[in-house]
Image: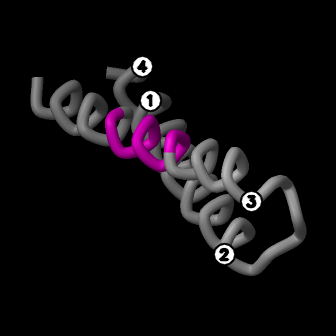
Amino acid sequence: MEILKRGNTLENRIRKKQEKVNRYISLHGIGNTEELLELSRELDVLILSWLKKKRVSDKI
């Protein structure tokens, strides 16, 4: 059950980060700005963490 709780928390963090990226793009467009690149990197790290946890929970 603990893995599911962590998974849901991680999914919420991914959702919030995605919303932040979408808001940034809405306001500033898709320029090659450092801030957008940093937000995208953070989102990528969260998604990779989620995929790793998903793989572990599928094996259990």
**Residue 56 vertical placement versus 38 (above, below):** above
Q: Amino acid at mark 1?
A: Lys
Query: Mark 1 = which residue?
Result: 54
Residue at 38% of width from left, 33% of height from top? 11
Residue at 67% of width from left, 53% of height from top? 27
Q: Earlier in the sequence, mark 1 or mark 3?
A: 3
User: Would residue 54 be counted in the magenta stretch?
Assistant: no
Labels 2, 3: front one: 3
Q: Position of residue 40 (x, y in %)?
A: 67, 59
Labels 4, 1: front one: 1
Asked whether the residues under the numbered discs 4 and 1 touch, taking CB atoms below 8 Å apart as contact, a structural biologist would say yes
Query: Mark 4 = which residue?
Result: 58
Q: Position of residue 38 (x, y in %)?
A: 64, 73
Q: Position of residue 4 (x, y in %)?
A: 22, 25
Density class for disc 4 (Cα within 10 Å; few <14, some 14-19, many ≥20) is few
Q: Earlier in the sequence, mark 2 or mark 1?
A: 2
Label 1, label 3: how many angstroms apart (C-alpha)? 33 Å
Asked whether the residues under the numbered discs 3 and 4 touch, taking CB atoms below 8 Å apart as contact, a structural biologist would say no
Asked whether the residues under the numbered discs 1 and 3 touch, taking CB atoms below 8 Å apart as contact, a structural biologist would say no
Query: Mark 3 = which residue?
Result: 28
User: Quadrant where the N terminus lies?
Assistant: top left
User: Quadrant where the C terminus lies?
Assistant: top left
Question: Under tag 1, what secondary structure?
Answer: helix
Identify the mark at residue 35; answer none if there is no mark.
2
Question: Under tag 2, what secondary structure?
Answer: helix
Labels 2, 4: front one: 2
User: Would residue 13 be counted in the magenta stretch?
Assistant: yes
Q: Which residues are magenta?
A: 12-19
